[in-house]
Image (cartoon, grey):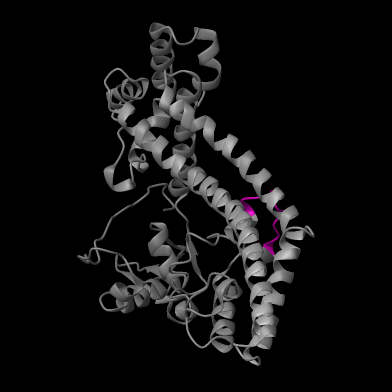
Amino acid sequence: MKDGKTYTHTYSLADVHTKKDSNIVLQNTIMDYMVDGMNIIASGSLVFKADGEVKLINTDAVAAEKEVGDVVVDLKCCLTGDLKFLAVMLGKENYEGWWCCFCKMFKDDWQGSKPALTNDDCWTIETLEDQALLNGWRFESEEDGGRLRMGVKTLPFLKGNIQVVFPALHAMMGIVNDLMCYFFDKIDAEIEPVPREEMQLRDSIPANKLLLLTQQQDFAVWVDAQNGGVELAEVTGALKMLKREMRQLNVESDEYKEQAGIKKAAEDHRNDLLKVKKQFEDEIAKLKQEIKDAPKEIAKLRKARKVLASSLYSKCELIFKEFGVERGSYHGGNFNGVNIIKLMLHSKKIMDQVTTLFEDEGHLRRKQCRRPYATM
């Protein structure tokens, strides 16, 4: 206000009990009332009357209704919430994990090199409306179009004069959880004593990837070789032609018997070539499966090791808990927003204790562990 005072008040508008947020739930309950109310506020101005009355009047009508002594306050309407809710309100439901909330980039675009963005790359309510109308014209259903839809499912429910404020906490949650995963991976790789079985599994992944590449290259050479894949294709083709010719012969004739002998020799040769081909294919499939299974087996061994009270993982978790930082089971074992805020507020104290832990355990000298970890 003009006197410098700030007035705040929180109003509870609705409470929807549901197991999962979705556009359908909102549309069948409070969506119409909520959207109408937000759009009325966004297109209005507050008029403080001389007698103390406060009116919300459409901005376009203020000039005609304003009286002497009235104080007019133009409104700035903002909307925020979690990413799921905002995606629904912007017509981007189910695309929030694949498309940027701010611009028109697909996740593969921004996860590579850092692109230079312009204002034309950023979404506005108007451009979201244009894209939704274009999608409706080009595609029969909301499920068609793939990436051509640009992550837009329906028309946004908001008007252009409502400013959407995306929750930075969600971005911070991802970054901090990635940092903590790297932190514990680093402990596993360089500090924590790891059983031989787990070390062998870890070493098997790069070794098997190299073997797989070699096998695939050897198989490709065999497929193109005259005495390999090329000969297999020729023998297979010759056998088909020979079978067609034999159908025209009398099975009791000498010619048929001669052709049957040729056919038997060709089938034996083809089977030998198929065995070689299958050996390549089986070895490649085996290596792919081992590469795929190894991380799962490592995760099992690591999980069993983590629960031990003697593990550095458990001891680090106890330090975190001293500062009220705990993983949320409903976040897949990650740190939720509240815990991340606590972690950031007490990061230096937490990492100082972690450094001391490493030092006391005799795993690292203080100068070796403080530099990479204490400033996280």
- Predominant SS along the magenta part: loop
Task: Name the residue: 25% across, 76% down.
Answer: 29
Taking the magenta stretch, the answer to whether it contains residue 114 is: yes
Judge whether 66 appears above or below 331 on screen: below
The answer to whether residue 69 is seen in the rendering is no
| Quarter of the view holding residue 316 | top left
- Residue sitting at x 64%, y 77%: 260
Is 236 placed left or right of 62 in the picture? right
Number of labelled discs?
0
Q: Which residue shows up at 56% across the image and 48% down it?
A: 283
The image position of residue 71, as x and y in percent, is 42, 65
> At which x and y percent is residue 239?
67, 76
Location of residue 305 in the rendering, given as x and y in whole percent from the top left corner = 33, 26
Residue 257: % across, % down = 64, 80
Q: Nearer the viewer, residue 357 or 76?
A: 357
Q: Nearer the viewer, residue 339 or 273?
A: 273
Quarter where residue 123 is shown: bottom right
Residue 193 sits above or below residue 183 on the image = above
Q: Is residue 27 visible?
A: yes
Q: Is residue 28 above or below residue 216?
A: below
Q: Relative to 365, is 279 above or below?
A: below
Indicate whether residue 295 is drawn in magenta. no
Q: Nearer the viewer, residue 301 or 260?
A: 260
Span highlighted in magenta in the image = 110-119
